[in-house]
Amino acid sequence: MKIITSILIVFIIISILLPAPIKAAADTGNTGNSTGDTGNVGVTCDARQLQPCLPAITGGGAPSGPCCGKLKEQQTCLCGFAKNPAFAQYISSPNSRKVLAACGVAYPTC
């Protein structure tokens, strides 16, 4: 239990210290790529928005409704989060894959 609490505290501290959120690039569909964008044009990429998912990712439980909603909203940002060393371990974890699957969000292929 202490490790989960420690991970949560570290995640919150890192979230607070990150630079300002950025806008995700929209997938216009003209390139033929399927990025999994669900029309979230101009979504602000903000890892703090995924805090409702922390219990499911760190503890392995089922994701909540708010978690799934935020994952779908931030779907276009997941590659950016996966490339960020502060979040890569969370995005690539087995529990993260389970949460994404349970929410119907494709695992990012970056």
Image (spheres, rainbow, N blue to C red):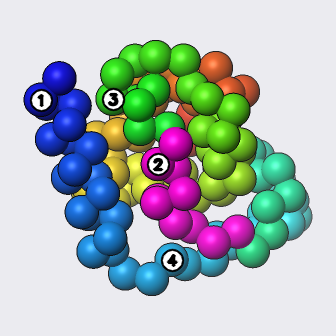
Depth order, front residue of 2/29: 2
Numbered disc 2: secondary structure: helix
Relative to 63, residue 25 above or below: below
Numbered mark located on residue 58 in the image:
3
- Tell me the crowding category of disc 3: few under 14, some 14 to 19, or many 20 or more residues within 10 angstroms, Cα based: some
Q: CA distance from mark 2 to mark 1?
A: 18 Å
Label 3 element class: helix
Q: Which mark is residue 21?
A: 4
At 12% from the left and 29% from the top, the residue drawn is 2
Sequence-wise first label, 2 or 1: 1
Query: Mark 2 touching mark 1, by CB under 8 A?
Result: no
Mark 1 or mark 3, which is nearer to you? 1
Q: Magenta part of the protein: which range? A: 43-52
Q: Is residue 32 above or below residue 25?
A: above
- Side (left or right) of 71 relative to 30: left
From the viewer's perspective, is the residue at label 2 or at label 4 nearer? 2
Residue at 46%, 48% in the rendered image: 51
Q: Is residue 106 visible?
A: no
